[in-house]
Image (cartoon, coloured by chain):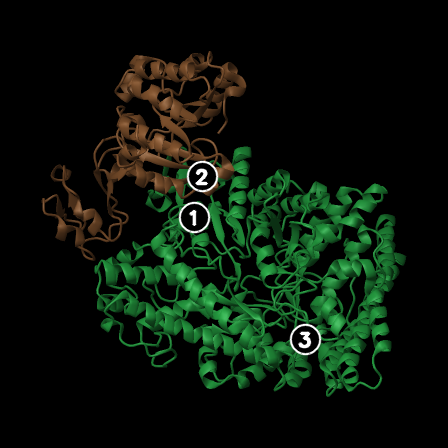
Chain colours: A green, B brown
Amino acid sequence: MSITTCECISPQEQRLYDTIEGKEDKFRKTHARVFKLLERFEGQKPRIDIERALYFTQSMQETEGQPLVLRWAKALMHIAENITVHVQEDQLLLGRAGCDGRYGILYPELDGDFLDIAVRDLPTRATSPATITPEDAKRVAEEIAPYWKGKTYHEALNAALPPEIHKLTYDDPEGLVSRFIVNETSSFRSSIQWVHDYGKILKRGFNGIKKEALEKLAALDPLSAADYCEKKPFLDAVVIVCEAIVLWAKRHAALARKKAAGEKNPARKAELLRMAENAERVPGEPARNFYEACQSQWFIQMFSRLEQKTGTTISNGRMDQYFYPYYRKDREEGLINDAEVVELLECMWVGMAEFIDMYISPTGGAFNEGYAHWEAVTVGGQTPDGRDATNELTYLILKSKREFPLHYPDLAARIHSRAPERYLWDVAETIKYGSGFPKLINDEEIVPLYVSKGATFEEALDYAVSGCTEARMPNRDTYTSGGAYVNFAAAVEMALRNGRMKKYGDAQLGEKTGDPRKFKTWEDFWKAYVRQHTLFMKTAFIQQHIIIHLRARHFAQPMGSAMHDLCMKHCIDLHQPRIPEGIDLGYFEYMGLGTVVDSLAAVKKLVFEEKKLTMDQLLKALDANFEGYDDVKALLRSAPCYGNNDPYADEIGREIDRISVEYGGKYSMKDLGIHNDVRYVPFTSHVPFGKVVSATPNGRTEWFSLSDGTSASHGADVNGPTAVMLSNYNTKNMGMRDRAARMLNIKFTPKCLEGDQGTEKLVSFIRAFCDLKLWHVQFNVISRNTLLAAQKDPQKYRNLIVRIAGYSAYFVDLSPDLQNDLIARTEHGAM
Amino acid sequence: MDARDDQGKEGLVFNIQKYSVHDGPGIRTIVFLKGCALSCRWCSNPESQKYRPELAYNAGRCLGLDKCVRCLEVCVRGGLTRSDDGMPSIDRTHCEDCHMPCASACPAQGIIVYGQKRTVDDVLNVVEQDAAFYTRSSGGLTLSGGEPLFQGDFALALLREARLRCIKTAIETCGMAPEDIVRQAAPLLNYALFDIKHADSSVHEAHTGVPNARILANFRILAEEFPDLPILARTPVVPGFNDTEEAIAAIAAFLAPYAHVRYELLAYHRLGTQKYHFLNRTPPMGEATLANGRISRLQSVALGILRERVQMP
């Protein structure tokens, strides 16, 4: 059984609700400030703050015709000059992108063409609702949305896609509703997940970057047209954006001073003055201590959110590395203690929790249900020269993760073969504590792979986790275009329906591969699947080709570029299609691996090998969504499944992976000029993708969600967590380069992790994960709620095994009475 | 003995369970062998007791005869009939020596067979799949049952083959086995989980069907003749049988002289009762449960005698 991990309610959040119910949280006393901060917004529906959208639009109206990067910088300056600045009660850090409490902001450059309607519907929509005042909704409709109609990237893309590409991409002429077959993801965000080189700004400050830009400007060839038309606007933009963020910071300083003057409480007054001093210095100048470093990073992070919508939120990078020099110096000089360090970090976590990455478009919303957020803070791993990188700060961040009551930040722990035992122990304890985080990312897979893709060892060893599972080299990565999410379960359906889908009726969406009743052998069926699969790949690659070139005309990010060595070196914006010396790590998503493998395995075994079913019986059962065909459904479910370390299923999985990787290897660099690698990371999108796929031969009923990432189908993995991991390993083509992240969710019962013994076993499990060179894993610790859900919906949880010394059984086989008994035990952690 | 002789040996296995973390050190795979000389009333694995394949029927998974009649179609012995409630009715007297085609015909795992003949090679191939996890956790193979030594030759062959493949071994035993088998098994083991259920032989016999003399003698063989073998003695604490301070104190006293032996109390649970129903048997313990707080009180009794040697679950 796999549970989507990036879901919103975690046991840690449960803890907060307990507190609201009057139970005293055990960490309240030691974390008084953050509890106070959190209580102010807990349970609030996010509010939409329109200021960013308003000032951005105002400025863009004024600058039409100028180079895009310059327009973007001017818009940021306009925002910096005008946006309301806030000093929050009790907060120790300054800088937010909108109003007090939980809030989201708008990016009309993405969805301005339907923003008026979307904003009107936002408060009442089913998933991730948000509130907006009627006055603000009116301003959106009158002052913001009209300007963007006809100008958004999304409209341009819709118009640019040729009909045969469009029909697999969108379900409507306007391109607002996805087909969820070959889904583009470039139009609901300005960039894929990203990490800045925060450390560089801590060291040099934006004034340092500005100085570099001015020197470069002075050194331009005054007679060169290229320098004048291309490099100069870029460098001008860098200068403006460096000044903009400093101005924005100083406005915060002024407000903090003003508040200090009126503050009665001497302790708070001192805090406000210190905050003002910080904001007067950073991020313009280099940070001199830990507090300034935090403040500088926070300004960068928040201003970056004002700059553009980075998919799944801008990530935080290797925080335990770039903060460490400041931490160590302050500790040595006795300027700060660990409790104060943790308090500052947690003030950042609160700020992250308040910012909601709003998805306005229906497709974007479906991709990221439940106010999803992946601001990945990376800890551990190796130094650029390949030594273990853990330090005191690593452990403080992990400790804070255990004690902070909300599911923030998204924490990623890098694992390598020489990771110290203490580190793994702390990671395991943190996972056990509740929400299953940190997620683990494996150096032993990523470092050599990135070297093979062109990075130096130093760059690869210094990668930071980005978004859900990606790894970034902040000064070497140069690819920002969202890739295609491809629904390969739909390819199975099309192989069964001669290129059609039940959901879309008579539309001939896929290849005419013929009536499967006439297929004589498994190879005939496999060929039909491969033809549909290849059509999807081709569509995805054409889509991406168009996207790469079109995006450059619509998006710029002068601040992100100012922080990137290669952009500065070549005076070119990060959103341009090609940055010299850059490594373009693009990817397309393989959606529904488990669903596809299990379906193909069932067809192969039951129809062609054992002949327990005819193709006709299968098609009738699928068409009827198994109604009246319960025995067929049960039979299909008994076929070999991915996630059980069963070679029968896993070999099909490896073959599917191979044809995907091979296609990428053949056409990525040659046609697209980028790596377009296969990746298995669906966020929450396996749910909407499932909603277009009718019943599949793995016994999955129609419109039910697909399997997620490289996890097994719902309830299909019946051999425990080691088998899930080995199936993941078995289906990888390790001799081939053109692969990217693989997300893997594994569940544990609390009993498996109980006590020091449980921690020790989890540590061994993590070491084995590292040995197997799997990209990613994260753990779900089964909670009481899961057992209750399994009681309600036994089909979905049919593989949930109860393991007790010398005994094990499927939970769903127990009588309700016994199930209740177990649920009661789980509350005491005794399962 | 030639390893090739071992690899082809067959035994009756009713389950192989990966990722076991409660029965021996590290991450382990438990191989459950069928057959046991005891018939404990509280047995949580009733399907393990008899040394022959057994037919089990899980009504919760059965689709019902209105939706599926695949089992009826293949039954040639007349063991399966349609009952009044529209579900299959099984008369197991017809199933002795049958190869039970109904189970493979059932698409829903409503009918299953407990106990498959498997070779040593086949079993160890499955066990070896998780080698990457054993390496990192000092885990390995655990033989359980039933009583694993009930199929003595097969169990020994499995242990030898595991040794050959450098897989660490443990056994979970009730102690009821011929002493020569015990002596042959001991040097092939890295760990033993040994059940001591009651110190009083007559009480033991009344509830398990056998006296405890052989069991205690086997325990002494392991503890005295193989002092390097780590032993965890375990007592399932069962209501109405040994859930008294006296009973636990007597067991602890028996263990006290063996300084390297650790001890653990396991609380009786009713989770196996469902499997009695699958086998069309009445759970002998009925609704009995352990009194609240009893386990912790008994643990303190054990702690008083064996101190840090008591392993807390």
Chain letter for the residue marked with disc 3 in the picture: A
Chain letter for the residue marked with disc 1 in the picture: A
The crowding category of the residue bearing disc 3, from other C-alpha atoms within 10 Å (few below 14, some 14 to 19, many at least 20), is: some
Residue kind at label 2, given as amino acid type: Ala
Vertical placement of residue B299 versus A551, above or below: above
The answer as to whether the residues below labels 2 and 1 share one chain is yes
- Estimate the spatial distance between the alpha carbons at disc 3 and disc 2, rounded to whole Å: 49 Å
**Which sits earlier in the primary sequence, circle 1 or circle 3?**
3
Residue on which the image places disc 1: A788
Where does the image place residue A454, in percent across and percent down from the top left? 62, 64
The answer as to whether the residues below labels 1 and 3 share one chain is yes
Residue kind at label 1, given as amino acid type: Leu
Q: Nearer the viewer, residue A515 or A438?
A: A515
Mark carried by residue A136: 3
- Estimate the spatial distance between the alpha carbons at disc 2 and disc 1, rounded to whole Å: 11 Å
**Element under label 1?**
helix
**Element under label 2?**
helix
Residue on which the image places disc 2: A824
Q: Nearer the viewer, residue A552 or B64?
A: A552
Determine the residue positioned at 30% across, 15% down.
Answer: B214
